[in-house]
């Protein structure tokens, strides 16, 4: 099997597993409503009900337009939080790997800050940065930053020591070794961090919208619950879930293609 066919087969297996996972989510959702009939039919909505709300009901076009308009806002907020968190994680991980004293000093502080619930920090964050794009960047970045930091640090620290020795012999310093050896070797860890962080970025975006900006699907969830707009509520949840799976799939496909080009195919 050639490298190209192997990559295509890996992508197909990956996408197939995601499709099966999505179908399983729908089955669990339906079984959950069957197991707890008290939730519906007033509150609970089946996948079929959500499909009808978005595509076949008389007002489906308007409902779909509103949901997808909010989804675009949420995806934009997700991108802002994802980029902010990943860039910060890469920069901090590089500093921690190059400077062990910095890692030993600040890593415990970072983990302690991560233990504070994001909801509890939201009033302080909004007070400091306001309710615009900045709060989306901060809250989304916080959710993305910590798991990405750990994965990226692990990848950077596991660079082959032989490469470090060669660079050292030719007069290169720690930063040169980081650039020439650690970062290329850490590409699989970077993609692993990205895959973990994409769903987290969506969570961060919806929380920021719920508590900070009052826009997007996060605000829709907040407003639909007290208004008893359960069709809109369940549709928003399903759309967020589908968006998370699609974004995860995009990162996974990019990972397979890039690693194949670098000769780092995963089994």
Image: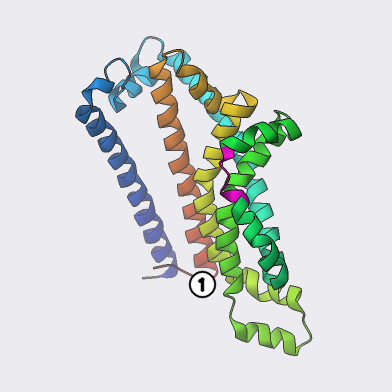
Give the residue number, with chain letter if any, for mark 1: 263
Q: Per the image, is 115 magenta?
A: yes
Q: Between residue 17 and residue 39, name the one nearer to us.
A: 39
User: Residue 125 vs residue 147: left or right?
Assistant: right
Q: Per the image, is 175 magenta?
A: no
Residue depicted at x 61% and y 83%: 161
User: Residue 40 vs residue 97: left or right?
Assistant: left
Image location of residue 179, percent across then percent down: 71, 71
Q: Between residue 147 and residue 62, name the one nearer to us.
A: 147
For the N terminus, the quadrant is bottom left
Mark 1 packing: few (<14 Cα in 10 Å), some, or many (20+)?
Answer: few
Residue 90: image quadrant is bottom right
Residue depicted at x 51% and y 72%: 263
Q: Is residue 101 visible in this depiction of the protein? A: yes
Image location of residue 119, percent across then percent down: 57, 35
Q: For the magenta stretch, what is the residue range?
A: 113-118
Furthest toward the top, the residue is: 58
């Amino acid at each position: 099997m050639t490298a190209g066919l192997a990559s295509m087969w890996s992508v197909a297996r990956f996408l197939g597993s995601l499709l099966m996972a999505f179908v399983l989510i729908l089955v669990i959702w339906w079984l959950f409503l069957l197991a707890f009939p008290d939730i519906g039919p007033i509150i609970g909505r089946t996948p079929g009900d959500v499909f009808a709300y978005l595509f076949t009901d008389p007002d489906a076009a308007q409902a779909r337009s509103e949901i997808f308009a909010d989804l675009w806002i949420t995806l934009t907020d997700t991108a802002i939080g994802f980029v902010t968190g990943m860039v910060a994680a890469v920069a901090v991980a590089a500093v921690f790997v190059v400077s062990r004293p910095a890692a030993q000093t600040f890593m415990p502080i970072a983990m302690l800050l991560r233990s504070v619930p994001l909801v509890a920090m939201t009033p302080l964050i909004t007070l400091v940065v306001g309710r615009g794009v900045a709060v989306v960047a901060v809250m989304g970045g916080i959710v993305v930053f910590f798991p990405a930091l750990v994965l990226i640090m692990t990848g950077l620290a596991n660079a082959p020591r032989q490469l470090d020795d060669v660079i050292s012999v030719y007069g290169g310093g720690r930063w040169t070794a980081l650039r020439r050896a650690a970062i290329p070797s850490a590409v699989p860890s970077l993609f692993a961090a990205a895959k973990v962080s994409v769903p987290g970025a969506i969570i961060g975006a919806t929380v920021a919208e719920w508590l900070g900006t009052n826009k997007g699907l996060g605000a829709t969830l907040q407003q639909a619950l007290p208004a008893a707009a359960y069709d809109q509520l369940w549709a928003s949840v399903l759309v967020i879930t589908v968006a998370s799976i699609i974004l995860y799939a995009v990162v996974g496909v990019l990972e397979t293609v890039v690693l194949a080009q670098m000769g780092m195919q995963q089994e």
